[in-house]
Image: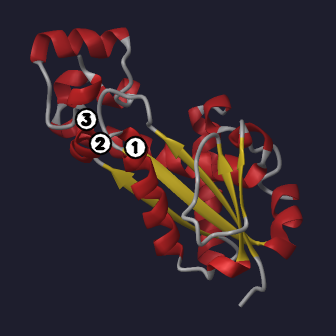
């Protein structure tokens, strides 16, 4: 067991009209961090700044590293139905808590680095929220990539169930194509009613 773990946390899908909000918590032993991001993950950045191909590349690499035991991560989705019921902020907090429970690490041994306005539960005393952390802190960038690829793949699968909305193209965001589909077909069970006024 490593003495200290660094956890990076980010979310994707806060703004779309359809689909879940998705969080990732990614943990690497503190002593391995520098080496980890000097190697195959050098150049990783905020998932929004990477091409889909680059995101997939890093995602497959991190899956392999997880298989070797040099990184652990957990992903949690909260559905549109729950977002409508409790609001986006509480949905994000719920997903974040779930990710940390799945990681099952001792809070006292963890330093948690979070993007933007995210906060970990209070018993994670060593935590820091970093504005634009997904662009400046590699472990948060990696969490953003894992969350983004996982959510995008989920939206592509859901597009097969609801083909009339073009979800595989816009991933639920409010693009012109999506707005037109909504006007024509109305809301699906995947849509956040509270976002679709």
SS of the residue under disc 1: strand
* Neighbours of disc 3 within 10 Å: few (<14), some (14-19), many (20+): some
Q: Which of the 4 quarters of the picture holds residue 184? A: top left
**In-image side of 164 versus 39 (left or right):** left
Where is mark 3, residue-wise? 159
Residue 133 location in percent, x, y? Answer: 72, 43
Front one among 11 and 123? 123
Residue that badge 2 annotates: 83
Contact, mark 3 vs mark 2 (Cβ under 8 Å): no
Query: Which residue corresponds to the image point at 34% horizontal and 43% vertical from the top-left?
Result: 20
Quadrant housing the N terminus: bottom right
Which tag, 1 or 3, sits closer to the chain's start? 1
Q: Is the residue under label 3 in contact with that under label 1 (CB below 8 Å)?
A: no
Give x and y (percent) for residue 191. 22, 31
- The one nearer the camera, 154 or 129, is 129
Q: Do the residues labelled 1 and 2 touch (CB within 8 Å)?
A: yes
| Relative height, residue 42 to residue 25 (above, below) | above
Residue 69 visible, this angle: no
Above or below, 65 against 184 in this view is: below
Q: Distance between the residues labelled 1 and 3?
A: 16 Å
Left or right of residue 155, residue 74 in this image:
right
Q: Where is mark 1, residue-wise?
A: 21
Between the C-alphas of marks 3 and 2, the distance is 20 Å
Instruction: Tell me the mark number nearer the camera, choosing from 1 and 2.
Output: 2
Label 3: element kind: helix
């Amino acid at each position: 067991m490593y003495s200290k773990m660094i956890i990076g946390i980010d979310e994707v899908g806060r703004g779309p009209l359809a689909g879940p909000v998705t969080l990732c918590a990614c943990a690497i032993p503190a002593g391995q961090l520098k080496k980890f991001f000097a190697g195959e993950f050098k150049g990783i950045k905020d998932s929004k700044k990477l091409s889909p191909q680059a995101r997939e590349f890093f995602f497959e690499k991190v899956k392999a590293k997880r298989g070797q035991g040099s990184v652990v991560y957990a992903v949690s989705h909260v559905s549109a139905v729950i977002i409508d019921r409790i609001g986006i902020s509480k949905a994000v907090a719920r997903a974040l808590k779930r990710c940390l429970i799945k990681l099952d690490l001792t809070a006292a041994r963890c330093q948690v680095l979070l993007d933007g306005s995210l906060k970990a539960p209070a018993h994670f005393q060593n935590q820091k929220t970093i504005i634009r952390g997904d662009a400046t802190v590699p472990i948060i960038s990696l969490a953003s990539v894992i969350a983004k690829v996982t959510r995008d793949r989920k939206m592509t699968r859901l597009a097969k169930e609801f083909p009339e909305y073009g979800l595989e193209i816009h991933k639920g965001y409010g693009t012109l194509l999506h707005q037109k589909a909504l006007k024509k077909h109305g809301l699906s069970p995947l849509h956040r009613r509270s976002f679709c006024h």
